[in-house]
Amino acid sequence: MNIRTMAEMSGARALMDSLEKEGVDIVFGLPGGANLPIYDALVDANFRHVLVRHEQSAAHMADGYARIKRKAGVCLATSGPGATNLITGIATAYADSSPVVAITGQVPLNMIGKDAFQETDIIGVANPCTKYAFQPRHATEIPEVVKKSFYIAESGRPGPVLVDIPKDVQQEVTEIRFPDLIKVRGYKPIVDPDLSNVGKAVELLVSAQRPIIMAGGGVILSGAFSELQALAELIMAPVVTTFKGKGAFPENHPLAMGPIGMHGHAEANRIILEADCILAVGARFSDRSVGRFDEFGKGMNIIHLDIDPAEIGKNKSVDIAIVGDVKSALRTMVKMLTKVAAKKSSDNPWLNRRKELIDYFSQNIKDYPREITARKALKKLRELLPAESIVTTEVGQCQMWTSLHFDVIAPGTFFSSTGLGTMGFGFPASIGAKAARPDVHVVDVAGDGSFNMTENSLAVSVLENLPVLVFLLNNDMLGMVAQWQRTFYDRRYMGVHQKSCPDYVKIAEAYGANGLKVQSMDELEKGIKSALRTEVATVIDITIDPEEDVYPFVAPGTGLKDMITGA
Amino acid sequence: MSSTEYKNKPLYIISSLVENKPGVLFRITNLFRARNFNIESITVGTTEKPDLSRMTITTRIDEAILDQLVKQLRKLIDIVEVEVLDINNTVYRELSLIKIRAKDFTNRNEIINFANVFRANILDIGKESVTVEVIGTPDKIDAFKNLIIQYEIVEMARTGVSALQRGE
């Protein structure tokens, strides 16, 4: 181990220095008994601390920050309930492969296992939803543990790492060494892609009559936007995305088809059934994307490119597997393709079919007969919002409407809780995103049900000057549940009515944010324009009809071919 | 899955080197539980290197699931090495202790005779029981168990399989 520096200090101080060495510029957290020494050291730290009102939001903020900055976001909590409150946020980051480093206080070493006040076995709790969880037992271990945490969180398939530090370890004053290099011998995050498989994939793509690219979240995580676009243009393949991959490819591009899946674009769900060769890039064939595993991709050649070897064959067996970093593998494919084949013409039967499907489904969209609908509202938002703005969502109908009706133009400017589907994620995550990119507008497309779960983050947005726009599609319902109860349970509604409580304008105002209620498209346009001009968080409460459903719909347990396009 | 169906699946022995530190066994068994993998036995012990333990897992599963299991194990940061041993080129043994009801002299003698045939050791003889140590492949232990089951097994303990690849 190389020794860079060595000094006498407390474990908590060593933690601050270690975080600084990792380039941390902001942490989101909330203090308590077991992390007081950390908070004491924070007073002198050279990075910003954002005080949250609930630990779950701290984890979501760190997650939102990480997804936009594409480096680890950091959150802090105390032991026991503080730590368990983080877990929903950590599990959210895990499901979406987002690098979050969560640092929790723990009861002193000699109290562990004694059921002490605010003691939780958070290492045990966090195990299934973290890449790794550390518990340093001496202050001297802290620098190495922190360095390993960032390395593990950010490398390979990213994900959250937890560091649980007993209070006496935070307080222990001793000689601390900061390592330059660390080695985690059981961790091999990057595999060089097998070039012979890349060659075979290229051959298959060139010879395919009806190739299609299915881009997943891995494209965004590795920042392989230009490589993906170059590849698609070379082989003239329509590009569908998974929902997590939304924004991996500009949705106004002539080859773009939008997301597939349960609430995918109708033309995307249809065209993928007609392809003869699918290149799945950084995607994991989730049930929400592909419907039934056994039906999906029947009779087609499937090429699967992913950084995580365990994803190959997990849900879907494939013809060619390429394990490796998406960006470098795509770059190699583009190089090989440029050598072996001339760029395909855009005037071919497959792309004409693409156009035909888009035209067919666009003619058949029946807008819900109301002055404001979710679709019209989101189209208006797109029209008024600069392309480089960042958009995230809550979970449920608001999320699926955004997927359907809001085109992401600048790659990597959209994210959502796609894997875990965490209601209450979007708002705190948008605040984290704003911290990562204060220079652009950040919007959370919310539903009333979700926003209600973490709306106390308005305090953070206002006090920390991290203004975001909450685009609240308010149908006074837990809308997606209500839609399922309408569809599958014969309209026997249970537990879905919000009964106009609370008043979101008053809520916003109570926190010092702007709140406005809009009931016409004209008011909506004015509201968006004024929100984009102000320097404070704005909640636009948009009244929509509680019976407006999300279509198309691929019912759970069915295949993409069973898609229902409208009521 | 019925027990015959299960027994008809091929036996795989997975050998892994893991970090010798607290919490590793928990992480590994938790993975099995979370991903719904069935395991038959798991053994852990120290190796020639003090910081590494060897963990041997036996399982009867389909090949596709085996592939997924190995990949998931490989992802665990505390696992340094994982391989599926080729059962034809592997030495593997299990140790079993079986306390058998032996009501009289005849029973005792029969059990001792069976034990001799199986090269098993008699570890203890009480007034009404005999405790036998059987070492061998899981099949051999099963065979011995099936033979003496007529006398009533009072208690039984098996270690699970330990295994090493043959040669260098």
Image (cartoon, rainbow, N blue to C red):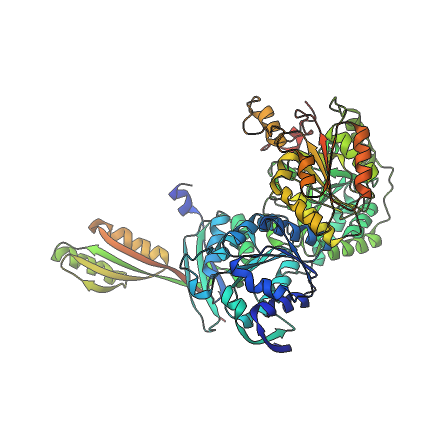
Residue A315, image x, y percentages: 59, 44
Answer above or below: position of B80 versus A513. Answer: below
**Quadrant of the rendered image containing residue A46:** bottom right
- Quarter the C terminus of chain A occupies: top right
In front: A209, or A124?
A124
The residue depicted at 24 percent of the width and 52 percent of the height is B153
Residue A481 position by quadrant: top right
Above or below: residue A248 compared with residue A33: above
Q: Quadrant of residue B163?
A: bottom left
Check the image and report above or below for A496 versus B37: above
Image x and y of residue A564, in percent? 67, 27
Q: So how many labels did they put on this image?
A: 0
- Residue A319 appears in the figure: no
Q: Position of residue B65 (x, y in %)?
A: 52, 48
Q: Where's residue A526, x and y in %?
A: 82, 34
Q: Nearer the viewer, residue A205 or A180?
A: A180
Residues A560 and A123: in front is A123
Q: Residue at (64%, 69%) from the top-left corner?
A: A17
Query: In screen coordinates, is A27 left or right of A171?
Result: right
Quarter of the rendering occupied by the N terminus of chain A = bottom right
Asked if residue B8 lies left or right of residue A103, the reply is left
Q: Is residue A172 visible?
A: yes
